[in-house]
Amino acid sequence: MATYKLCIKCLTLNLSRELFTQDTNGRWDTETWRPVLSGSRSELQKRYDTCGLCRLLLLTLNANTYAVSDQVEDFEWEAAWVLNDLDYRDAELIPHRKGSGLCVVRKAWFDAPVNLIQLVEDETVIDEPLYGRHRGIDVDIDRILSWFQFCQREHDDNCSAAFLNVTQRPVPTLMIDVIDKCLKPADTGVKYTALSYVWGRNNEPQTRESTLQEFSEIGAFDRVTLPRTIEDAIAVTVALGFRNLWIDSLCIVQDRAKEKLDLINAMDSIYSQAALTLVAATGDTAHSGLSGWSRESREEVRELTATIAPDLTIGVLPPCGHLIETCDWVQRGWTYQEGVLSNRCLIFLEGQIYFMCRKNLWREDLVGGLPTTNFSGSPFLGRPDENWNSSPQPILEELIGYYSPRILTFPSDITYAFRGIENAIGPAIGGTQFFFGLTSCAFDASLLWTKKSRNEVLTRRPGAPSWSWMGWEGATSYLATSYFIDEIDWLTTRTWVDWYIVDDSDNLVYVWDSTRDTIVVNQSPKGDLKLQGKSQPIWCYGSSLEENPFGRQTVLWPVHERPPALNASTVPRGFPYLAFVTVHSIFNMRVVSQQHNITSTYIDICDKGGLVCGTLGDYYLSDIPSPDDGIKSVEIIIISYADEGLTHFFTAGKNIKEIYGEFEVEPLPTIAFNVLVVAPHTQRLGIYERVGSGFLLKDALFRGLEPPTWKQIVLG
């Protein structure tokens, strides 16, 4: 650990241990920000090798989200004292357990802080949480075991049973015996660790029919060269006192198709039943190793500390949440459900080891582990706040929002890599069926996904239908459903489409069928279920009847004429086509840009007279006109009434307010429709694809380029 002097400017701070242990009210928000030091980045670069604080200030700046490099032009920065609780901001901590850290940000930009400069001491000097501690060059196995044992002893039930109701299936058929270094059949009830990692392109060897016998012989894995990450996982498992380890590449016989599919469909059980999941969060291949296990990977992190006085050492302590958000592991699709479904994770990340359960976060470089319910890092493992007073449907939608931006080497894996989530949360939604990530019991609501941001680019994903978010690569979210006031009332009174789907057996069936699905139908009074110890409503249609298959209470048709019956004989088979009858029309769309800022660009729907009568939250195709190109005609289908909770969102656009003014809005079912933009499939005659979504004012329905008509639609 290097010793440094301080420059004249940094000496003016009169740094002492007391400054770091005091409880400050400072935050990085504009109201409480009080700069105590400022300067230019070029000054820090000049004093990098001579002043310990300047060195850490520059390292902190370079680690921020804007990730500046040496080639970037110079800029001004400023630093202030803030609370050192970035990972634990929502935890219920008594004040004296918090200290202070120096936060440095780019002046005027006011980026959210990524790292703080904090006090670093030995545990023999201080034992209060949230202060940095010296971290040895070797892994302290006893400390890791103490974290695990504390979790087991103090909150085993809380960490084993979250909102995800995982069905306990038999454990996987094969395990790695880390003592005998070979594959063995798994014993019932055996305790094991599991590995979650990024495969990369060359993850060999793998277990196949041709290697199964060889890998089942004692000492087999001493006689083959294993990827570094797998070797480290075996070593960690031995060190922690476990004998069994589950790794997908070796514990699944890769060329046994049915067995492989069965295990893929059981990922929820495999990872939730593991005593501990080892997460290789750093590295984009199986050869990267577990960062923080080897001495060389730990040495790099030790460079982030500086001794500036005989009794004062400070260091850069990055928040776990930011590191997880930006690491290789969190970008990949398959690793998502592995993190969500695991009860306890030992995370190897940027040369450090973290222990994360559903209640606590421990880290090597901080003293103690604190109980927390929603620290800033937790959403990146896909675990919503357990205090949510919410039904399972929006929890599922939140999980989809975290999963959808992730990358898959093979795009067709999109359904399999999410299957564990469906299996786990399905029972909380009464056992509803899933169709490409959409719930059958609330299908109209599940269709209301949209791009996560206006500048997000969605591209078509092969192997999944366009009507599902799985059919598009890119980040999606459920903005519309988050504003619902009464979801069950909306499902049964503000929708009208009878949705059909072509199933795996090429049969045309209803998406919702209360006699087929195991879900308990909500009637009045509304049914509910216990979620996190609270009663939560299930979003659900009513009981299916021959004349009312979706069990709606009332049907408010968008036009006076009743719809014709679906002609099932004309619906193609062989793909999960969505078939239905609804109102179809053609309108113009016009792109409007505010202040040349792409994030504030939105798309107007215009009637035949050019009057703005709606808005498109997104449009996925590349033929979108620029603001200078004028208008483009698009086909629109009406799928439901917009919920009244969307009033302020729908009227947020400048042009909408110009037309309607600030008025007292009556319930939105009389105001607007949810609509989809559709386009003919380029290769399949008679098939449409979903290419956008938005809202259309109800009174504009008859002002389109063509009169609204009932039309049978088949979406591919």
Image (cartoon, rainbow, N blue to C red):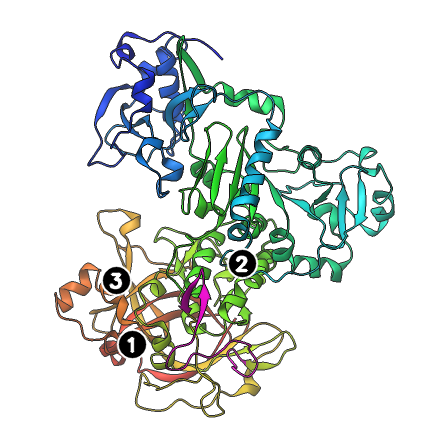
Spot occupied by residue 655 in the image (x, y as percentages of width and height)? 18, 62
- Asked which secondary structure carries label 3, the reply is helix
Q: Position of residue 587 (x, y in %)?
A: 30, 72
Camera-side mark, 2 or 1: 2
How dense is the environment of label 3, judged by Cα within 10 Å: few (below 14), some, or many (20 and up)? few
Earlier sequence position, callout 2 versus callout 3: 2
Predominant SS of the magenta segment: loop
Helix, strand or loop at mark 2: loop
| Part of the protein shown in magenta | 510-536
Of the two numbered discs 2 and 1 on the same chain, state the one appearing first in sequence.
Answer: 2
Q: Is residue 606 above or below residue 214?
A: below
Dot 2 alpha-carbon crowd within 10 angstroms: few under 14, some 14 to 19, many 20 or more: some
Instruction: Classify residue 689 as left or right of residue 24.
Output: right
Q: Is residue 47 visible?
A: yes
The kind of residue on which mark 3 rests is Phe
Q: At label 2, which amino acid type do we have? A: Arg
Mark 1: which amino acid? Leu
Verify CB contact (< 8 Å) between mark 1 and mark 3: no
Q: In the rendering, which numbered label is found on residue 649?
A: 3
Mark 2–mark 3 distance (CA, rounded to whole Å):
29 Å
Q: Which residue is mark 1?
A: 705
- Answer with left or right where residue 93 lies relative to residue 232: left
Which residue is nearer to you in this view: 115 or 495? 115
Labels 1, 3: front one: 3
The residue indicated by pointer 2 is: 461
Q: Nearest the camera: 376 or 125?
A: 125
259 left or right, relative to 38: right
Q: Quadrant of residue 308?
A: top left
Q: Residue at x 34, y 81 (%)?
A: 493
Label 1 to label 3: alpha-carbon separation: 26 Å
Residue 517 sits above or below residue 71 on the image: below
Q: Quadrant of residue 285?
A: top right
